[in-house]
Amino acid sequence: MALLIEEGGLFTTVQDLGRRGYLHQGVVESGAMDRTAARNANIAVGNEEHAAVLEMTFIGPTITFQAGCLICIAGDGMTPYMNGNPSTLGTPFFVPQGTSLSFKVKKKGIRTYLAVAGGIDVPVTMESRSTYLRAGLGGFNGRKLEKGDQLTIGEANELVRPIMEEATKQNRLWEADWRVFSPIIEEQSDDRSVIRAIRGNHYHRLTDESKKKLFQATFTIKSQSDRMGYRLESEEAIQLEESFSLLSEAVALGTVQAPPDGQLIILMADRQTTGGYPRALQTVAVDVSKLAQLRPGDSFTFTEVSLEEAEQLYLEHERAMAMRRNGILLKWKQIRRKLEGKE
């Protein structure tokens, strides 16, 4: 065992990048809500990007490290504290055995991720370690973490192992002199008040007035929102030209549905596999992480982009992420060479 959960926080679960390839069997994808933050945390400690992390929502847990661990905390919504001292986000730390990690709520954001070198070692269920709470599937016994839970950690990347071994001998906190930041491309700003989207398959069935409102109105996230979907509230309902029957169709992360009451729903990580409501919009992939950090009560507007622009944003984001990953691997190699006296 390496992590002892002293307090579970409001909603702390084990997540990776999702359970893919089972939608046709009715198994939801799940996975981290803010995948950019989860990937950043993993990259920083030398993990594969899909390694399992802890997703902490709004109120973080209190954790005692039962063994020395290399960790990185990324995302927004909380400030980490180690042994009572404020710490930084995005920085890799080696924390000695006995270190206590806790969190304080910030004024913005809602989800923070803890990556540990080697990854959270829970059983793989249908090719993923993600928790799907409604079905009790995956993660740590299919549920959120509670006081007294103990988590094991996998084997760390060989690049970071010598650093961990040296820090363990010295039994002291080690901190890298660099850290990962998000966003990683200029076009992916931190501004969460504007979410980019392309027209959905049924956009053309909306009234002309509703088509305008989609990109002019302010939408507020309702308290009934969760990992499955964000329920939105606006002053005026989004209406169809005429009602029509729609067979349930496959839906995607970030799909914006227009149910009969005219109040939109955005489908998130634990979304169902198919949906029968008209699809008004599709959030661009690079803005889903921004959505994931919005709290109930936060407001935003949609702005329209073309499919070509959305694809270009995605490609630029993935290129930048690959460069970040390669750059960090080089940093770990340099640290290791210095440790071995080769530089």
Image (cartoon, rainbow, N blue to C red):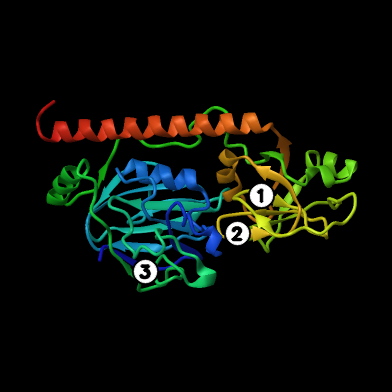
Question: Is residue 33 left or right of 219 when viewed as pictured?
Answer: left
> Label 1 to label 3, Cα distance in Å?
37 Å
Q: Are marks 2 and 3 in contact (CB under 8 Å)?
A: no
The amino acid type found where label 3 is placed reads: Glu
Please give the name of the residue rendered at 45% of the width and 30% of the height, measured from the top-left corner: 319
The amino acid type found where label 2 is placed reads: Arg
Residue 24's image quarter?
A: bottom right
Question: Is residue 19 left or right of 179 when viewed as pictured?
Answer: right
Q: Which secondary structure lies at badge 2?
A: loop
Q: Which residue is mark 2?
A: 271
Within-10-Å neighbours for mark 2: few <14, some 14–19, many 20+: many
**Disc 1 or disc 3, which is closer to the eye?**
1
Residue 39's image quarter?
A: top left
| Residue 177 or residue 83, whichever sits in front | 177
Within-10-Å neighbours for mark 3: few <14, some 14–19, many 20+: some
Q: Which residue is mark 3?
A: 6
